[in-house]
Image (cartoon, helix red, strand yellow):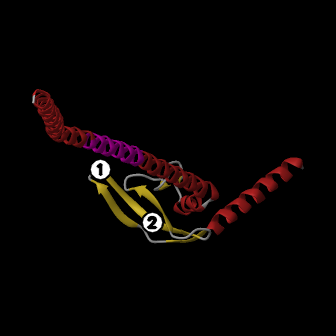
């Protein structure tokens, strides 16, 4: 008796799973022939699932007997309807979502890497520009100093000439003072003699 109950329960579970899986498929389009290259020819059918937008593709090699989901390996069955049920099932949907998440994560990582690389390149370019500006400033300062050196030398020479002229004037003034004193002394001598 318990063996019969187990068998009935197994049949009920199988029917429930089959009806649940079949409930996932909204429709299966008629088959089309697709040849991807000279050795890759398939019968292809689009499957609309009730729980998802868009369609999913199942395909069977023209010389094969299994229908399989095109986007993921391992979801195959010799019966087209059962293969359609598999690609509309939760496991296939989860596997597609995992692949999508992985692709999104890889894209996000690639974008982040590209941004980091661009930031490094921008930083290096900014440092090169700053270094170039510093070199230009230093060269301009050297050029200014080089241009100013002859002017400084000229000013220094002119300052020395002014000092010499001033010394000459001082000497001339002293000479005149001495001549005036000599005249005064001569006058006193002439006065004393006379």
> What span is in magenta?
117-137
Q: Position of residue 188 (x, y in %)?
A: 15, 31
For residue 22, above or below residue 64: below
For this orientation, the residue located farthest to the front is: 194
Q: Position of residue 120 (x, y in %)?
A: 40, 43
Tell me the element at label 2.
strand
Q: Which residue is mark 2?
A: 45
Q: Position of residue 140 (x, y in %)?
A: 22, 43
Q: Which residue is mark 1?
A: 39
Residue 111 or residue 136, whichever sits in front: 136
What's the residue at 52%, 61% (across, down)? 80
| Residues under numbered marks 1 and 2 in contact, where contact means CB atoms less than 8 Å apart | no
Circle 2 Cα neighbour tier, 10 Å, few/some/many (<14 / 14–19 / ≥20): many
Question: Residue 194: which quarter of the image?
Answer: top left
Q: Which mark is residue 87?
A: none
Q: Is residue 35 left or right of residue 27?
A: left
User: In the image, is 166 to the left or to the right of 132?
Assistant: left
Residue at coordinates 46% horizontally, 52% vertically from top-left? 107
Q: Quadrant of residue 144?
A: top left
Closest to the observer, 85 or 185: 185
- Tag 1: Cα neighbours inside 10 Å, few (<14), some, or many (≥20)? few
Q: Is residue 125 magenta?
A: yes
**Residue lying furthest right in this view?**
1
Q: Looking at the magenta stretch, what is its main secondary structure? A: helix
């Amino acid at each position: 008796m318990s063996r019969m109950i187990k068998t009935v329960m197994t049949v009920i579970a199988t029917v429930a799973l089959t009806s649940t899986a079949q409930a996932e498929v909204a429709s299966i389009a008629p088959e089309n022939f697709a040849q991807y290259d000279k050795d890759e020819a398939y019968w292809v059918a689009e499957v609309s699932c009730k729980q998802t937008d868009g369609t999913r593709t199942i395909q069977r090699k023209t010389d094969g007997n299994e229908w399989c989901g095109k986007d993921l390996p391992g979801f195959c069955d010799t019966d087209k309807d059962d293969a359609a049920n598999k690609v509309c099932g939760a496991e296939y949907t989860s596997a597609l979502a995992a692949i999508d998440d992985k692709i999104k994560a890889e894209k996000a990582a690639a974008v982040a890497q590209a941004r980091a690389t661009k930031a490094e390149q921008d930083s290096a370019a900014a440092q090169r520009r700053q270094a170039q500006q510093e070199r230009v400033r230093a060269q301009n300062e050297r050029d200014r100093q080089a241009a100013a050196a002859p002017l400084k030398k000229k000013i220094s020479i002119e300052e020395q000439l002014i000092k010499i002229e001033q010394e000459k004037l001082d000497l001339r003034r002293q000479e005149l003072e001495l001549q005036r004193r000599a005249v005064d002394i001569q006058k006193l001598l002439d006065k004393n003699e006379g």
